[in-house]
Image (cartoon, grey):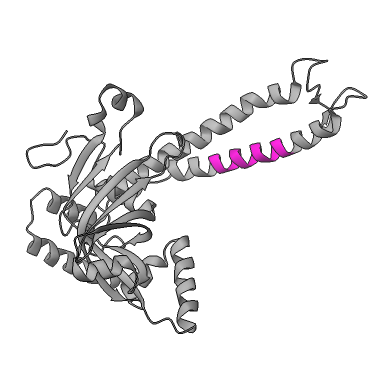
Amino acid sequence: MTDAKGRSASPRVTVDRVLAELRRSHFAVLSTTGSDGASHSAGVNYGVSAPGTDLALYVMTRTHLQKARDIKANARVSLVVSIRRRFAWFLPPATIQIRGRAELLQGTGEAGTQVFRRFWIGRRILHAYDKSRQRGESRICFLKITPDPVVRTYMVGSNVWELNRRMEAGAASVVIPPDHDALGPSPRQKETTMRRNNQALFTLLLIAAAAIVAMPLLMGGTGMMGWGGIYPGMMGGYAAPTGSPTWPWGMAFGGAFMLVLWALAIAGAVLLVRWLTNTEQPSAEDVLRRRYAAGDLTRDQFEQMRGDLEPVAVARPDS
């Protein structure tokens, strides 16, 4: 459901969430159209420009391939990015659909190279193309794709129950302002990141609690003569009835389980302390961004005031 301007009416689908999902994924289907009007599609690995720079997607390829030849004739392209599900992997993936304009850049360009260095498969691709250059390959290039403002999504932020009642509920769109990503992480992005970190912390603590509850059941089996037959012994170890065929396996399992349990407990304690002691206050630039987002400042005022803050952060008075 969208408003009169075509923007998403769902609070779950925001510009910040779409950008975060784009940066989390690195595979898309790229569609191009050639000079003869024929369309072509290909799976590509991509990277997204860093926050604080103009939004763009980069793909590494070679100039003689079909997609590069198509872009020379027609710069209009589209991409479909599938979002992997962490738990319900058997359900269709959510998708982000992007339209935009593409251009060919040198394969040694600094912008594209920096983007690909930030993720694992990108570094592998750079390494493979470096070897190709050593063998004399000179057709390597980057595709720089500048997205249109309107980005459409399906099933991003939706749950199965909503889609079961009404399939159209999964469709949404957002409008990305041209300078949105150039301003760097917004307060909303930081808030979203903090919320996800809190959810991860809660999940870890829940797993640790479940492990503590489950340990007596797993270690004790179903009773004195049950399937496990393992019980706490002297000196903090584990023992089993004499002659029990499960004795060696029980000891090995018990030791490994205790190591995992202690690792979860320690990690949960560390994250809990960090979360409780996090008293970070919004910086002057965060406040400035909020005022700009609320319409209190023009872009010229924002840029001027942000420039005034930069020397303050560098030249601090001696204490």
Q: Looking at the figure, which quarter contains the C terminus?
A: bottom left
Which residues are drawn in magenta?
A: 256-268
Q: Is residue 225 above or below residue 182?
A: above
- The answer to whether residue 23 is left or right of residue 246 is left
Query: x, y (%) of residue 193?
Result: 35, 46
Q: What secondary structure do most residues of the magenta stretch adopt?
A: helix
Q: Is residue 266 magenta?
A: yes
Residue 233 percent across, percent down from the top left: 83, 27
* Drawn side of residue 244 relative to residue 218, left or right: right
Q: Give above or below for 228 relative to 59.
A: above
Residue found at the very far right of the displayed protein: 243
Position of 21 relative to 237 (above/below)? below
- In this view, the residue in front, 180 or 234, is 180
Relative depth, front residue between 309 and 11:
11
Q: Nearer the viewer, residue 226 or 308?
A: 226
User: Can residue 312 be seen from the camera position used here?
Assistant: no
Q: Nearer the viewer, residue 314 or 238?
A: 238
Residue at the image position 70 percent from the left and 36 percent from the top: 258
Q: Position of residue 175 (x, y in %)?
A: 16, 48
Q: Where does the N terminus fall, quadrant-wise? A: top left
* Residue depicted at x 45% and y 74%: 129
The reply, left or right, for residue 178 in relation to residue 194 is left
Q: Number of labelled discs?
A: 0
Image spot of residue 317 (x, y percent) = 29, 71
Quadrant of the image occupied by residue 235: top right
169 to 129, vertically: above or below:
above
Report if residue 83 is visible in the image: yes
Q: Is residue 204 magenta?
A: no
